[in-house]
Image (cartoon, rainbow, N blue to C red):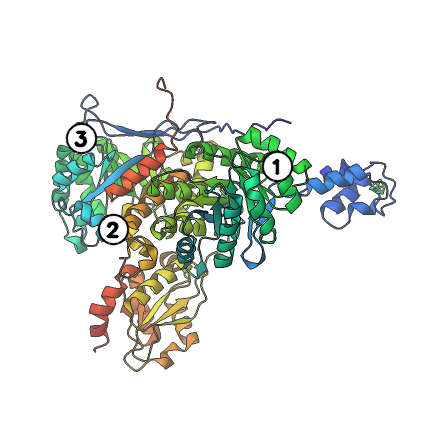
């Protein structure tokens, strides 16, 4: 949270004594705001002022860490309501629910299966929510230990009452699980959280969360996650929107925490859609009682999409990418270095199993048509990229024929002249690549 | 300290646009569909109005459906090739509108003549009482050739015709004005281009209240988020009072799903992704729900299963206004 010079000025004695080395308190305040001086440089500033400034400079939504080590999940610390205003900072955790009564090996295997790579990123399920379905705290601990050993992912531990969380919380304290007592936190959970130093869930409507957060803070708990409880998607959207606004726009600290949203829908399709919706609108952990990939995949992709920094074009390296071990008679596809474009082409090429080179031209991460319109994907740029890459040296005579996207068929003549080589117009869409390889390519290179 | 009231009252409202005309209104539709009219961000009923639920159209076409992905094709296999039957089916499937896609007019897809296209429009209007959206081919010359005949054939029915683009809007604008239809203004994911196009349309006489905007469409994971953000930005402007951004939004989702490997790749190729008969409609529905979150009010789908799924999901979100409203 940016603190202005005026905010700081209000905290100073306003005597303009110049003991700080600056002629006036206001000038000094400006220096502090610009981080050119520390508040301590004023020998007369009160303890209360120091504390007030310390709080004011905290981010409006707390950063909460769940788990430990490399797989730890950091959530919260968000700064905007709409991603174009800056970006969404900390990708939400996507959690699969496991009951301590489940076949844990099967569950662990299913969750491992949900660890996928897409467009150069790992997009898997990254949290396990272990619920005490047995009603026995010891069983919950055993199940959590087992999941920890099998998956080493951050965990949410869920039980109806604090006493059932105790064994697992104490046994796994080093792994920093998030403790979720349903409808909690009771005094017992607050005590457990404070003693173990673990983050806790505060569940209920905004008013209840408001009170409970303050109670827990007084007990010394710093890291908390809010949860609207068992409400309709409409209720959850309202909670998620209001709590985030209260934190970001009014710096209302009791609601300045990330939010856990549980997809309550029974039907798996609806559950998946509900979860997607929480990913887009302000959920920081989204819990699903579902582990089949066909239902989880859209949720993972929704997260991957919405947490992209809208200010930075998503691009891949501009170079020759060798797919399926190409040789000197393999096709050479030319496209842009916009990630989406490249990965669409890559997916089709991989599926075709045809050894291929893909030359990505540096279009600053813009798509084929956009780049062409902006003069970043014209004959000149393509020629330059081909020459720079030296890719023709790897190709036999007769195969030095770049295949350009059908969308820019208009440039084929000019490019061909520039290169002094035949240029092949490929399909308009990546989806046409396989057909192109099978039917057109062989005749075009005369084999 | 009580929890601060952070509900927001916004100064602008999205235009309310009705598609379709009943007999009393000079058409032959059995019902009309109204979208827009919001004074809040999507679904935030606690602080503003969202008077009409998002509307869903199902796409039909006289063109070959060979390039449709298998999971969408299986639903329409019986009716493809028979627009009238297909239109009737859409009604059964719960569509609010029908979207006749004129792809068949493109030379690469059979080159249906303007007269044939106009006849297609007439037959669809005859076969179903639902309001009609008519979507051109993406090729300017073809559109300018066929669309005037089609708007004429549907005169009085208050259809929605698209698409008008910055470099090709005059013909469609004149036709829609002459035959009293609503118009889709298409600008590729950029609110300034979009506003510019609305000004151009206004300059040739189109009422800003008769425009639905199409920021173009990408599927979830395949460009959706760019357009999602464009819609959000436009919505913020519209709700803050910018009359050039108060047009409801249409997205044409159905035809985008086939590009998404995660959605349509068969299980033999991608066993790690699970059942394709679940993935394909779910992807289409998830894309639809995502666009509604951004602000879209009219969604064109292909897969009737996806339509049901998305509608059910939105029922859990859409704040039904009080009966008296
Ligand atoms: S030392 Fe403190 S009180 Fe004196 S001028 Fe500087 S800021 Fe003001």
Check disc 3 and report the residue beneath it.
B129
The x and y percentages for residue A36 are 75, 51
Query: For the residue labelled by badge 3, is the local secondary structure a helix, a strand or a loop?
Result: loop
Residue at image point 36% right, 19% down = B325
Dot 3 falls on which chain?
B
* Mark closer to the chain start, 2 or 3: 3
Q: In which quarter of the image is residue A54?
A: top right
Q: On screen, B249 above or below A115?
A: above
Residues marked 2 and 1, same chain: no
Q: How crowded is mark 3: few (under 14 residues within 10 Å), some or many (20 or more)?
A: many
The x and y percentages for residue A438 are 22, 69
Tell me: A313 left or right of A253.
left
Tell me: A367 left or right of A60.
left
Check disc 1 and report the residue beneath it.
A188
Residues marked 2 and 3 touching at CB (< 8 Å): no
Query: For the residue labelled by badge 2, is the local secondary structure a helix, a strand or a loop?
Result: loop
Residues marked 2 and 3, same chain: yes
Cα gap from disc 1 to disc 3, whole angstroms: 63 Å
Q: On screen, A121 above or below B257?
A: below
The x and y percentages for residue A273 are 37, 42
Q: Quadrant of residue A28?
A: top right
Label 2 vs label 1, nearer the camera: 1
Check disc 2 and report the residue beneath it.
B139
Q: On screen, B270 above or below B288?
A: below
Query: For the residue labelled by badge 1, is the local secondary structure a helix, a strand or a loop?
Result: helix
């Amino acid at each position: 949270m940016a603190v202005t010079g005026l905010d700081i000025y209000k905290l100073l004695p306003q005597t303009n004594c110049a003991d700080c080395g600056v002629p006036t308190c206001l000038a000094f305040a400006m220096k502090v705001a610009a981080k050119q001086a520390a508040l301590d440089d004023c020998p007369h500033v009160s303890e209360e002022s120091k504390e007030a400034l310390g709080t004011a400079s905290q981010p409006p939504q707390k950063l909460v860490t769940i788990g430990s080590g490399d797989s730890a999940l950091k959530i919260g610390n968000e700064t905007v309501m709409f991603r174009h205003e800056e970006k969404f900072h900390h990708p939400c955790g996507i959690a699969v629910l496991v009951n301590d009564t489940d076949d844990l090996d099967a569950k662990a295997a299913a969750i491992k299966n949900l660890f996928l790579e897409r467009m150069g990123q790992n997009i898997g399920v990254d949290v396990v929510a272990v619920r005490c379905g047995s009603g026995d705290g010891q069983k919950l601990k055993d199940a959590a230990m087992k999941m920890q050993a099998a998956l080493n992912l951050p965990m949410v531990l869920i039980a109806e009452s604090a006493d059932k969380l105790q064994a697992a919380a104490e046994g796994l304290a080093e792994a920093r699980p998030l403790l979720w007592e349903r409808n909690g936190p009771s005094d017992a959970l607050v005590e457990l959280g404070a003693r173990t130093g673990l983050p806790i869930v505060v569940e209920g409507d905004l008013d209840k969360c408001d009170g409970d957060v303050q109670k827990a803070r007084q007990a010394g708990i710093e890291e908390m996650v809010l949860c609207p409880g068992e409400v309709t998607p409409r209720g959850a959207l309202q909670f998620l929107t209001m709590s985030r606004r209260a934190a970001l726009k009014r710096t209302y600290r009791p609601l300045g925490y990330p939010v856990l949203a549980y997809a309550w829908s029974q039907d798996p399709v609806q559950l998946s859609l509900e979860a997607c919706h929480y990913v887009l609108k302000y959920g920081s952990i989204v819990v699903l009682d579902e582990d089949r990939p066909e239902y989880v995949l859209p949720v993972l992709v929704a997260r991957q999409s919405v947490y992209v920094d809208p200010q930075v074009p998503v691009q891949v390296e501009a170079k020759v990418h060798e797919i399926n071990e190409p040789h000197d008679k393999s096709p050479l596809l030319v496209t842009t270095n916009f990630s989406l474009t490249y990965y669409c082409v890559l997916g089709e090429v991989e599926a075709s199993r045809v050894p291929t080179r893909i030359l990505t031209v540096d279009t600053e991460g813009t798509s084929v048509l956009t780049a062409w319109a902006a003069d970043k994907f014209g004959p000149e740029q393509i020629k330059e990229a081909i020459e720079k890459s030296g890719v023709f040296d790897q190709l036999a005579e007769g195969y030095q024929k770049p295949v350009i996207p059908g969308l820019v068929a208009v440039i084929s003549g000019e490019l061909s002249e520039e290169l002094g080589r035949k240029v092949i117009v490929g399909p308009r869409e990546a989806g046409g690549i396989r057909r192109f390889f099978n039917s057109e390519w062989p005749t075009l290179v005369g084999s | 300290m009580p929890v601060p009231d952070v509900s927001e009252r916004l100064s602008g409202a999205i235009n309310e646009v009705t598609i379709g005309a009943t007999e009393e209104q000079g058409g032959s539709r059995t019902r009309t569909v109204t979208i827009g009219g919001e004074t809040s961000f999507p679904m935030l009923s606690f602080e503003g109005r969202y008077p009409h639920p998002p509307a869903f159209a199902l796409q039909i076409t006289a063109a070959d459906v060979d390039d449709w992905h298998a999971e969408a094709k299986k639903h329409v296999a019986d009716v493809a090739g028979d627009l009238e039957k297909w239109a009737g089916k859409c009604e059964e499937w719960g569509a609010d509108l029908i979207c006749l896609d004129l792809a068949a007019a493109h030379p690469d897809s059979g080159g249906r003549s303007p007269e044939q296209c106009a006849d297609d429009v007439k037959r669809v209007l005859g076969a179903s009482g639902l309001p009609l959206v008519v979507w051109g081919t993406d090729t300017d010359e073809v559109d300018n050739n066929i669309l005037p005949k089609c708007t004429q054939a549907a005169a009085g029915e208050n259809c929605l015709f698209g698409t008008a683009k910055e470099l090709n809007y005059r013909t469609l604008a004149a036709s829609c004005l002459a035959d009293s239809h609503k118009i889709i203004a298409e600008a590729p994911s950029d609110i300034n281009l979009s506003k510019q196009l609305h000004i151009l349309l206004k300059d040739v006489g189109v009422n800003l209240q008769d425009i639905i905007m199409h920021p173009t469409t990408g599927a979830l994971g395949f460009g959706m988020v760019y357009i999602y953000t464009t819609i959000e930005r436009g919505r913020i402007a519209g709700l803050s009072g910018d009359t050039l951004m108060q047009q409801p939004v249409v997205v044409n989702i159905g035809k985008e799903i086939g590009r998404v490997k995660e959605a349509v790749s068969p299980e033999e190729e991608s066993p790690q992704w699970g059942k394709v008969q679940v993935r394909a409609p779910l992807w289409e529905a998830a894309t639809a729900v995502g666009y509604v979150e951004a602000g879209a009010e009219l969604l064109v789908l292909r897969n009737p299963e996806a339509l049901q799924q998305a509608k059910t999901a939105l029922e859990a979100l859409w704040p039904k206004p009080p009966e008296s409203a």
